[in-house]
Amino acid sequence: MILIGTGSEVALGLAARERLGAGGFAVVYRARDTRIDRTVALKVLEPALIADETRRLALLDEARLAATLSHPNIATLFDVSDAAGVSYLAYEFAAGAPLRAEMGGRAMNPVSYTHLT
């Protein structure tokens, strides 16, 4: 079983360090993959939704789509799991402000895409 929360050591070799945000059905954490000693963005299906087949399949569809992408400005999908009562995606972690904050509620100028860090 996976325990999620800031400071939680996750049985799968992932340690949640900081909650970064949440969406319609998942929570994203800055986490540490202790197996290979790297920081990842860990997107975890909300525990209350594990039994929701539609949400689980949507997360796995995201994983399939992310696995087809390869671009320097798109986070790489490192790991996916849908077992032992947990569904998660582990992405490359990109430090910096969230894109929503960068956009400030307005459309982004395409020229500014190249300046995001």
Image: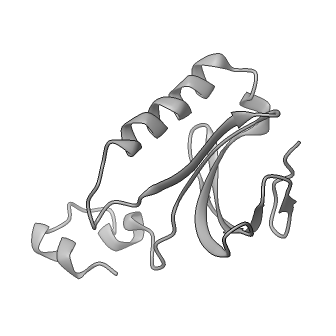
Q: Quadrant of the C terminus?
A: bottom left
Residue depicted at x 20% and y 65%: 108
Q: Quadrant of residue 25?
A: top right
For residue 35, side relative to residue 26 (left or right): right
- Residue 65 at x, y percent in the picture: 37, 37
Residue at 14% in and 69% down: 109
22 shown above or below 48: below
Residue at position x 40%, y 61% in the image: 75
Residue 67 sits above or below residue 40 on the image: above
Q: Which image quadrant: the N terminus? A: top right
The image shows residue 4 at horizontal and vertical percentages of 81, 54
Q: Which residue appears farthest toward the top when viewing the image?
A: 53
Residue 31, picture quadrant: bottom right
Image coordinates for residue 43, horizontal then vertical, percent: 61, 51
Which is more toward the observer, 67 or 93? 67
Classify residue 87 as left or right of residue 70: right
